[in-house]
Image (spheres, grey):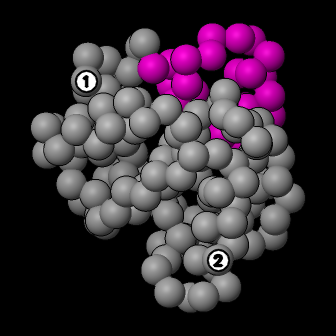
Amino acid sequence: SKQMLQILLVEDDDVDAEALLRAFRRQRFIVASLTVVKNGLEALALLRDLHVSNGPTRPHLILLDINMPQMNGIEFLTELRQDDMLKSTIVFVLTTSNRDEDKMAAYNKQIAGYFLKSRAGHDFQEMIKLLDTYNRIIEFPPEVV
């Protein structure tokens, strides 16, 4: 693969976050980094800080939950897409929400895909396979490489 992915997971459920980390390890999906934050506010603070500090680079992609306290996934996407420095960031939604309104709102904010946790495969297997393929064959926006 051309690069090891840097992933930001925006997820308020510790159990789900831990399950995903374990799944990555079990399936030998090696990522350069996987950072977990609890909600959209924390995610924006981190992303803006990374951008300003020129320290660690911005994540190649974000895995985003919808239902979170303080700032939910849709609110986060709205902010993200209005920020010139961040608006090209690749986002996949990973959620339990099967609501059409959530799907529509998320796709209207240019997400790359909408994963239902229940259909991401046993141990997130199918989703991880897709992310691995995505990383190998998709060209990423230049400013996040």
For the residues labelled 2 and 1, say whether their Cβ atoms are less than 8 Å apart.
no
Q: Is 112 covered by the magenta stretch?
A: yes
Q: Residue at x 60, y 88 (%)?
A: 53
Q: Residues within 10 Å of mark 2 (few under 14, many from 20)?
A: some
- Measured from the top left, where is residue 71 in percent x and y? 76, 42
Q: Distance between the Cα atoms at labels 2 and 1?
A: 32 Å
Q: Residue at x 32, y 53 (%)?
A: 136
Q: Residue at x 55, y 25 (%)?
A: 95
- Measured from the top left, where is residue 119 in percent x and y? 41, 14
Does residue 69 appear left or right of residue 114 in this picture?
right
Q: The disc labelled 2 sits on which kind of residue?
A: Asp
Question: Which image quadrant: the N terminus?
Answer: bottom left
Residue 121 lies, with reference to residue 10, above or below; the image says: above
Q: The disc labelled 1 sits on which kind of residue?
A: Asp
- Is 142 in front, or is 83? 83
Does residue 113 appear left or right of residue 52 in this picture?
left
Residue underneath mark 2: 49
Count of numbered marks: 2
Badge 2 marks a residue whose secondary structure is: helix
User: Residues in magenta?
Assistant: 94-117
When asked about the image quadrant of residue 12, the answer is top right
First-in-chain label (2 vs 1):
2
Residue underneath mark 1: 123
Tell me, yes or no, if residue 66 can be seen here: yes
Q: Nearer the viewer, mark 2 or mark 1?
A: 2
- Is 145 in front, or is 41? 41
